[in-house]
Image (cartoon, helix red, strand yellow):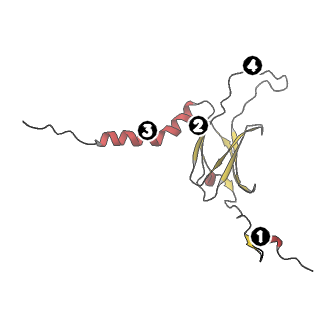
Amino acid sequence: MAKKYIPAFSTDILLYICLILFTTPCVLSAIVPGGINLLNDSAFPLTAVIQGADGTFLGQARFKPGEQLSWATNFDPTKFHSPSAPNVSMTPYTVVWKCTNGGFYSTCSGVSPGSLVRANACEGVYYCKPPPKKNKNQQGEEQDSSSDSEDD
């Protein structure tokens, strides 16, 4: 009796798996109204602060180096009425990338929904100051290196 050959893994299946894994974040941000993709392509942990067109704070997220996130407003439709601003728009967004110590890293303005925003593609200084080193004195207590010497 002859055995049928069944391939263990087809290259077509591998191609579809790769396609799904690498395009899902981009597709989701395009499907979700107002969504953007945020990518920390720096060597530093950063916080992305998202602002509306009028400078309104919309949200923030922390990122490890190389981490990516799809962000969306997730606002439900509301009956918003404002006599002073009848045509309120949250877009284009501004994304401010900040260092963990609160320092400025970069800023992208004019961000459209569905965009990919990379920290190193925005205008900025592209550097985060390292945290101060901790020294141990003779008793084994930690203290900041910035405060261990004083001028007389």
The label shown at residue 79 is: 4
Q: Is residue 74 left or right of residue 83?
A: left
The label shown at residue 114 is: 2
Helix, strand or loop at label 3? It is helix
Find residue 74 and report its horizontal and vertical position in percent.
65, 30
The label shown at residue 20 is: 3
Compare marks 2 and 4 and give the one earlier in the sequence.
4
For disc 1, the marked residue is 141
Find the distance from the CA under tag 2 to the CA under tag 4. 25 Å
Find the distance from the CA under tag 1 to the CA under tag 2. 50 Å
- Location of residue 143 by image quarter: bottom right
Q: Residue at x 73, y 30 (%)?
A: 89
Residue furthest to the left in view is: 1
Q: Is residue 5 left or right of residue 83?
A: left
Q: Nearer the viewer, residue 3 or 80?
A: 3
Find residue 72 and report its horizontal and vertical position in percent.
63, 35
Q: Quadrant of the N terminus?
A: top left
Find the distance from the CA under tag 3 to the CA under tag 4. 37 Å
The label shown at residue 48 is: none
Residue furthest to the bottom in view is: 152
Amino acid at dot 2: Gly
Helix, strand or loop at label 1? It is loop
Compare marks 1 and 4 and give the one earlier in the sequence.
4
